[in-house]
Image (cartoon, rainbow, N blue to C red):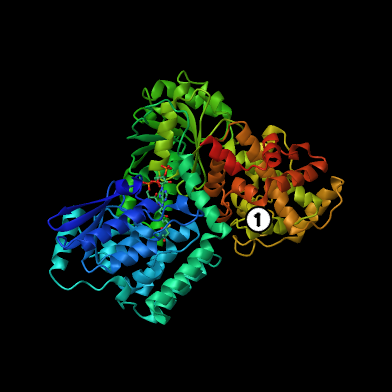
Amino acid sequence: MAQQEVVTSSVEDSVAVIRIANPPVNALSAAVRGGLKREAEAAAANPAIRAIVIVAEGKTFIAGADITEFGKPPVPPSLPEVIAILETLAKPVVAAINGAALGGGLEVALGCHARVAAPSAKLGLPEVKLGILPGAGGTQRLPRLIGTAPAVKIAAEGNPISAKEAQSLGLVDEVAEDVVPAAKALALKLAGGTLPTPARDRANLGAREAFEEAAAALLKKNADNPSVAAVVDAVRACFEKSFEEGLAVERAHFLRLRDDPRSKALRHVFFAERAAARIPNLPKGTQPRPVAKAAVIGGGTMGGGIAMCFANAGIPVTLIETSEENLQRGLERVAGNYATSVKRGSLTEEARDKRMSLIEGKVGLENAAGADVVVEAVFEEMGLKKEIFGKLEGIAKPGAVLATNTSYLDVDEIAASTSRPGDVLGMHFFSPANVMKLLEVVRGAKTSPEVLATAMDLGRKLAKVPVVSGVCYGFIGNRMLARRTAMAERLLLEGAQPKEVDKALTDFGFRMGPFAMADLAGLDIGWRIRKATGKKAPVADALCEAGRLGQKTKRGYYDYSADGRTGAADPEVAALIERVSAEQGIARRAIPQDEILERLLYPMINEGARILEEGIALRAGDIDTVWLNGYGWPAWTGGPMFHADSVGLPKIVARLREFAAGGDESLQPAPLLVRLAEQGSSFAALDQKAA
Ligand code: CAA
């Protein structure tokens, strides 16, 4: 039976070793919960057993509740029930934490009498990242064990801590390389004396002021996050209520948040990110090539940032420029970025020195010879890129992956300039490359499966979220962005002001609207591209012609003359927009905020549907992953395609038809969108079918 397979126990030296084996991460499925209860009760009843140790197979201890069970009818025993059984046993129970003990996994450990952790183990309560809060006593036991101030921080931030830190906080009793024998020895030692007080009965809450101070800082930083507010409320109950009453406070928050659509969206985000790592139909046995050394061509902002990604991951990298002067400028920019991190306290000086020592600057393409992967990050100019890839053919070692960081250009055309197109693909980083998590891996028509697997594997090693895209203008992200950019301009012509358009998106949850973003990036980038491609954006063009290029000229869509960074609405811009509207013969009108939002988002969703239909994206979830990690789409709405499902596809189809009736045929709903809407289906269902 499944239950007997995932949790087993053996008796070793009068210690019952209860072993959980539920790959890949020992999540607390119904079978695991049932198995733990069964084995714990059997050990309690067996007079030959003096103590109990809970161990787990594989790399992790227990990664928490089984997230796939959320939203399904509950199957007993519940996790709180299992933990209560462990906690009230008359024999000592010790957790042998070999790897990650997260969420419900840490809560199981908190229900034990003591904890032994491996040096590499991570302990945490990441539930807030899923839009919930710990639901099995974590907000009550952890504060009683280590104090309310550190506990509220761990549960509200959701970031795991190291075994060493856990030991210094009193969360872990011992750190040992070999956790099972160490836990057994500790369990036997405890069996010989009085049983340690379980976490629930400890009173190590710390000072109320320290807690309130920590709580205020967390609430300020996460003002709109209902999970953080719930964590603070539940931990505060430790001061005001009994343990049992505190559990009830936690439970009420847990049930409310679990059923909130925001938590459903965040669970989708979790699984979509992981699904994006899977490439269907790769030939069996395809292995990534090893990458021990990298080269980046072009020491501009992008190239320097990409070189930092390699150095941060411990991979030596050569940054290549065409002149000593450009190279020095590039290296100085990199050093400047690291210096900022050191100043902020997010990087130690030793780590900075180590990383800088992994970046070697060189002049001349021939220095790419020793690299296992070469990333080209020069100007967006097809001629230049083809020239570089042509030359690389004679320089790069056989089997080296040749990647272009192009944002728009045809990767197949670039690949055709070498005799090894199978080694070529796109690795599209997002600016700033050392910060943004998204990596679009652009698979060309001839990219070999091995090379694709190498780029995906490398992406993860660089701490990125890699997503596969097919070749098309702008790939997944920028192709959709172009729809939003065009509509934002159109809204200005029809009657909106930049502030109203930006506000619609920031109210939805984006950090910045399109115009504030354009001012930050510089309006001349788009202007140059439009000139090269013969496209027009009357308002943006007029601003550029007036020398308003964004923050760098202190004027763009907004006026930055106050402090260089804060944009104020500018009457000159309002007048310019009105003039351009008149020139275009467009009658202006007040446009309601909800219409602005729909007109910005639905055309993007529509383009997403086309991208999916054409096979450019493998899944709707991949499109969401792109927008969440590269463009600041608010995670609690799940990404554009998940949001579309939440709104309802029939509504989106109907609205797009209304927009298209205004004369822009490109706004007609994509056939896939229409089909799914008519079938009463969804993007999620489509992904599920394909999985
Ligand atoms: N439930 C179900 N599946 C899970 C899971 C969970 N809690 N955690 C991970 N998985 C699955 C992943 O979906 C993935 O599946 P596929 O291979 O099919 O894509 C697989 O396990 C491996 O996961 P990763 O790719 O993330 O592996 P990793 O080695 O990079 O990381 C990890 C391992 C650190 C444990 C990471 O998976 C992780 O952070 N997991 C989530 C932890 C978490 O949020 N726990 C809290 C759950 S909520 C809770 O516990 C509530 C409560 O109070 C009871």
Q: Which residue was labeled with disc 1? A: 505
Is 68 left, or right, of 201 in this rendering?
Answer: right
> In front: 136, or 220?
136
Is residue 215 shown above or below 292?
Answer: below
> In front: 540, or 271?
271
**What quarter of the picture does the N terminus occupy?**
top left
| Residue 544, image x, y percentages | 70, 47
> In front: 468, or 274?
274
| Residue 583, image x, y percentages | 85, 46
The picture quadrant where one finds residue 346 is bottom left
Which amino acid is tagged 1? Leu
- Label 1: which secondary element: helix
Is residue 349 shown above or below 388?
Answer: below
| Residue 622, image x, y percentages | 54, 41
Is 380 left, or right, of 245 in this rendering?
Answer: right
Is 292 left, or right, of 214 in this rendering?
Answer: left
Residue visible at 45% across and 47% down in the picture:
434
Q: Under 8 Å from ligand 1: the CB of mark 1?
A: no
Is 486 left, or right, of 279 in this rendering?
Answer: right
